[in-house]
Image: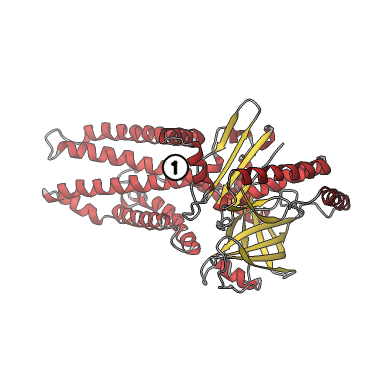
Amino acid sequence: MSFPMAMQANDTSNCLPSVDEMGASVVTTGTQTGLSAESTVFDNEDGGGSDRSVFRQARRYIKTGWPFRVVTSLYSERKLLVMFLIHFVATMVIWGHFALIKYQEQEEKVPPDANRYWWKVLAPTLEFGAMHAILFQMAILPLTVCRLSIAVASSSVFDRIIPFNRMMRLHIHLGYTMISIVTVATLFFFTFFGLLCSDGEQDFCDKFTSEIMITGYCIFGFLLIIGFTSFLRDKIKYEIFYAIHHLVFILYITTIIHTFDVVQRTDERQRSQTFKWFSAIVLYYVCDRAAMHMNHRYQTSIAASSAVTSGNGTRMAIIKVHRPVLFHFKPGQYCLLRIPAIDRHWHPFSIASGPDSDYLEFYIEVYDEKSWTNQLWTMIGLRHNPKTSSQDEFETSVSYSDKNIKLEVKGPYGTSIGRTEDFSHAIAIGSGTGIVPVLSMLKQHVHQLLRLDTTKYLTEQELRDRKIRYVSETRGYSEKPIVSLSCSKKSSSDLEARNKSKQKRMMMGDLKGSDHCSRRDSSL
């Protein structure tokens, strides 16, 4: 049973918050008779434009055309595409159903000889259908961000048909769909009212300043603000994006007020009330967040911290915190961190440690001077070293232990990276932030092998490393260094002594969750 993994030395962007939102992570599992790709979408090809990209080399070696890549991509996202199709059909059915009801009502209400007859029949028809299509988006949107429910459901049988690992993609899709429908409906409504107002029909001119139109302006404005900041979420501070995104709660309240206008309150006409569509779903979302806060929030402290500065100035903070007793997770999941000494915001990070470890490890890339990550960097005592002697080697590594930094952990959330337990072999490839859950899965795999047969595992690992070095030397890849997780080359006597030492440490309980191979440069 093999579990190789490699990553580039000059790619240090592997510690951003969430694997579901950025980076690339690929898990390919297979049996002796075939392969089944769990995820084969590469969001970041070269991690910075380098010719040493693993993905770029693989593409040149395979030499596949764009039809093959398109088909492979569609197949890997088949569950998400099915969800998109179901969502589209459901939206069109709801739109058509309520549009037909309004059409029949307008046919009876509007005289055949009325001015702009078809405008007065079709415009309210399309608007009424669009309104309920928007309410449908608002009804299912909160379900895609119920983190606790998604984490629990991803471990059930529903994970085989519902893409829980792509819920953020679905959330973004629903949000942009709602904004698009609202924008088109608003422009169409203004055109309709403007035409009739220009024809001298004062009732339609007065509607521009009516109570329901004013609340409609507010809804449209909130949606534009949320949509604009969401589109620029990679260019603005996370705290600003997170705060503005909570305007959605005001949006829901305004939507409820929207149909409780003076016409509804005076019983002049009964309107279709919006709260009936999403009140239960919003209440469920609130309960999910309350459960997160009350049942999955833990107080802990940092046990050790390390900091690494690359030759090109990129900084990374690696922290190891004491794992709470009730905190159980799977490789690929993430949690939220909050350090009260820095601020009161929660920050999501993927977990790099193995599920059996007594600690939780996080690899955090440090950004600009005003960022939360830089404040953490300063807190653990590292000062940036501007010296850049090499682009491919880590030049500075400073470790700090027992810093007694208190922090809060909330989680775990997200989904596991793949179902490898059902297969004989697994290949994990990570680029950028995708390397963090791969590390967690690798550590779990190593721990399971060590529990079975420590000596056999270490011996086979040394033989595999020798084969890799032989292939590297014979194929001329020595000029393209990467960083791999493996053990250094030793003689047979050293290997035997090391195996006995590790077996003894395992028997004493010191190896659990903390022993792994060192990081080294090799040519592949």
Residue found 76% across the figure and 42% down from its top: 448
Q: Nearer the viewer, residue 239 or 330?
A: 330
Q: Residues within 10 Å of mark 1 (few under 14, many from 20)?
A: some
Image coords of residue 93 (percent x, y): 38, 32
Which amino acid type is marked by label 1?
Trp
Q: Is residue 149 left or right of residue 255?
A: right
Q: Nearer the viewer, residue 146 or 412?
A: 412
Q: Is residue 330 visible?
A: no
Residue found 88% across the figure and 51% down from its top: 504
Instruction: Tell me the residue that label 1 is attached to.
Output: 277
Q: Nearer the viewer, residue 74 or 53?
A: 53
Image coords of residue 513 (percent x, y): 76, 52
Q: Nearer the viewer, residue 404 or 136?
A: 404
Tell me: residue 421, above or below residue 50.
above
Residue found 23% across the figure and 50% down from its top: 190
Image coords of residue 68 (percent x, y): 45, 33
Q: Is residue 403 left or right of residue 278?
A: right
| SS for dot 1 | helix
